[in-house]
Amino acid sequence: MSMLTRRRLLSRAALSATAGATGTGLRVGGTAATAAVSGGLATGCDADTDPDTDPTGGPQGNLRFPTGFSWGAATSAYQVEGATKEDGRGESVWDTFSRTPGRTRNGDTGDIAADHYHRYADDLDLMRDLGLGSYRFSISWPRIQPDGTGTPNQRGLDFYRRLVDGLHERGISPMATLFHWDLPQTLQDAGGWENRDTAYRFAEYAEVLFRGLGDRVPVWLTINEPKTVVQNGYLHGHHAPGFQDPQAAYLVAHHLQLAHGLAVETLRATDSTARIGPALNLHPCYPADDSAEAAGASHLYDGYENRLYLDSILKGSYPADVLADLGPGSRMARGIRDGDLKTISAPIDLLAVQYYTPYYVTGTGGTVTRWPTSQADWQQIYPDGMYDILTRVTRDYGPVPLTVTENGLPQADTLSPDGTVDDAGRISFLRDHMAAAHRAVTDGVPLESYHVWSLLDNFEWAEGYDQRWGLVYVDYPTQRRVPKRSALWYREVIRANGL
């Protein structure tokens, strides 16, 4: 790998960071928020809000989604559960990383997070009151296998059984993610995702869950955002395990995708009727100008951002331009064995798409900002990117069923003296992105469902608790839940099945 390639990869990781330094923030306005109380959702709009003129008062248009379209919200285990030392849970790489001084903002950890482990029943009631049809959550690997292998921890399995049963009791469909970055520390000590053996341990863990939870989970997602592990964990180093090693990074990319394929094969070997697929964060890449250099650089950038993961899973090959850029002697190239890509491309039932931002690529391989950013200064707010990435997947890879499993933005939300949270900017963001998704559906994209990121304010990785992404405000000192104005708006979207 050349020094130029190494510098470009490190630069790409910095620009693609999902936990960058706080930016200037999105300016938002809005009138008084709809009343919201902890433990439930209020009804109607505030007395001072005219639903016929207030653009955030509720769905006022005629954009209706197809019958059967499902609306949901998403979380991940380490970000919301807490209880990191309870009921036999082992240590994860994020326990180690977040407890290391200087790794997270304010030294924050997920030790308590949103205390969902103890408050899940109340959170399920919030989901029911919101009208969710689907809840996308993740399962903590070290809660199931404290050391990443061997006999499962029954108390951990029982927690997720209670969660899944509670969802069914409330008419909400479970969508479970097997891996959302909390690798057992014991496996990291043995080499983590650089070690090919970790992919096989993942398949064993997946089988424990497939057999332990059975068809009570109708949809399984394998690996959440392998690209983020690669770029933020192994290139830039501000996510666990905190490395800056381009050679290791793309070997990790291969092993993560191998783990995905092995999990798919494992499910097929059972008698399960559940569906399965990966969860990929996809970012449309556009040339920053009309030059041939920008077009070429944008294509390669897209290779690292999107095609490296889409091609391998849906076409059974890695993009030639990315492999050439990495070089034939790269650890990734040397780590690919006969049969790996056949495993990685085992047929999936659906693809989960997570969209946050576009990239505009210059002729030298850098990027420029074209649109307003959110509180997360890496996130450009560009709803048309949602349309572009959904239609691109269908156009380039065929009619694989799609679900949006993450879409949202952070704001500096505050709890008003009257006990409400007015997050009008989030409503505008969600409305515009949902409209883009609707346009994609109208143009033939087989999109089945949409999940807001996130249900709850939570531990936002390296940013700690400074960024709030939730529909529901969490007052961390008391763990009180307060549905924000966006939650009330979203409830009406769900009722109307449209905007």
Image: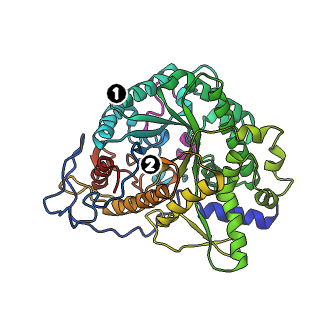
Q: Is residue 34 left or right of residue 459?
A: left
Q: Residue at x 83, y 57 (%)?
A: 327
Amino acid under label 1? Glu
Q: Nearer the viewer, residue 212 or 111?
A: 212
Residue tagged by mark 1?
169
Residue 133 falls in image quadrant:
top left
Location of the C terminus (image quadrant)? bottom left
The prevailing secondary structure element of the residues shown in magenta is loop
Q: Against 426, is 493 above or below? A: above
In magenta stretch: residue 314: no
Residue 467 falls in image quadrant:
bottom left
Q: Is residue 173 visible?
A: yes
Q: Is residue 53 left or right of residue 486?
A: left
* Image color mode: rainbow
In magenta stretch: residue 85: yes
Q: Against 212, is 94 above or below? A: below
Q: Against 374, is 170 above or below? A: above
Q: Against 171, is 59 above or below? A: below
Residue lying farthest right?
Answer: 329
Q: Residue at x 45, y 22 (%)?
A: 158
Q: CA distance from mark 2 to mark 1?
A: 21 Å
Magenta region, residue range: 81-98
